[in-house]
Image (cartoon, helix red, strand yellow):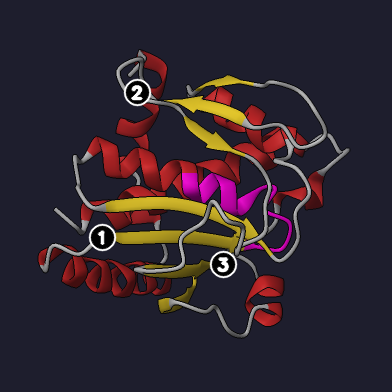
Amino acid sequence: MNKKLKDYILEIIREKDIILSERKEALEHLSSFIKGKVTNDETVNLNFICTHNSRRSHLCQVWAATAIAYYKINNINTFSGGTEATAFNPRAVAALERAGFNIKNPGGDNPKYAISINEQEAPMVCFSKTWDDQVNPTKNLIAVMTCADAEKNCPFIPGADLRIPIKYVDPKESDGTAKESSTYDERCRQIAREMFYLASQLI
């Protein structure tokens, strides 16, 4: 793991006390459910779902995977999807790069970004897809709804052992404004902070 990403992680771990109590309760409920599965040696597949699978769901997938790797937790996999497919928004990708991730963009209308934590592990491949895309799991599934629209438009997720809303404000509200980068950085950091708090409850 490069120094920039490592320093970022150490900072957000120290920020756990600024997570709102009601959000901590939701994260602890999720962690308790996950822990019960992992304790029984079951595999857990976290699928983070938002409308377009372009911003929040990807940020959650990447940071949850990073936190799981950081704490060396086994039997947990992370995925993401949307109620429709678009593309992983380059503004969200840029926020992850500013946090310290190494990211390769192969180009195309819906690029399959390769996101690396370190050189020893295979990169995460992130691209926009629907929640029920063939690359996403159908068993041992926990559906985490990251936006209100997905929560409303996906009333039922087949195969989900748990469906839980952990919603984030969409950073696209600042697209094209002077606050664009800072808004994406803020949302990226909030999600990183909360995914690390979630993972910390599993050790």
Total numbered labels placed on residues in the image: 3
What's the magenta region? 50-61
Q: Label for residue 84?
A: none
Secondary structure, mark 2, is helix
For the point 65% across and 78% down, the residue is: 154
Tell me if residue 57 is in the magenta stretch. yes
Q: Quadrant of the N terminus?
A: top left
Tags 2 and 3 touching, CB below 8 Å:
no
Classify 10 Å Cα crowding around label 1: few (below 14), some (14-19), many (20 and above).
Answer: some
Q: In the image, what residue type sits under mark 3?
A: Lys
In the rendered view, would you say 72 is above or below 53?
above
Q: Residues within 10 Å of mark 3 (few under 14, many from 20)?
A: some
Please name which of the two marks, 2 or 3, marks the residue nearer to the observer.
3
Q: Are marks 3 and 1 in contact (CB under 8 Å)?
A: no
Is 60 positioned to the left or the right of 84 in the image? left
Across and down, in percent, residue 181 comes to: 71, 33
Residue annotated with mark 1:
43
Say if mark 1 contacts mark 2, CB within 8 Å: no
Q: CA distance from mark 2 to mark 3?
A: 26 Å
Q: Is residue 69 left or right of residue 53?
A: left
Q: Position of residue 34 (x, y in %)?
A: 26, 67
Q: Which residue is mark 2?
A: 7
Label 3 – label 1 distance at C-alpha: 24 Å
Left or right: 128 as drawn, with respect to 2: right
Q: Residue at the far bottom: name it.
A: 155
Return the residue found at the far right: 176
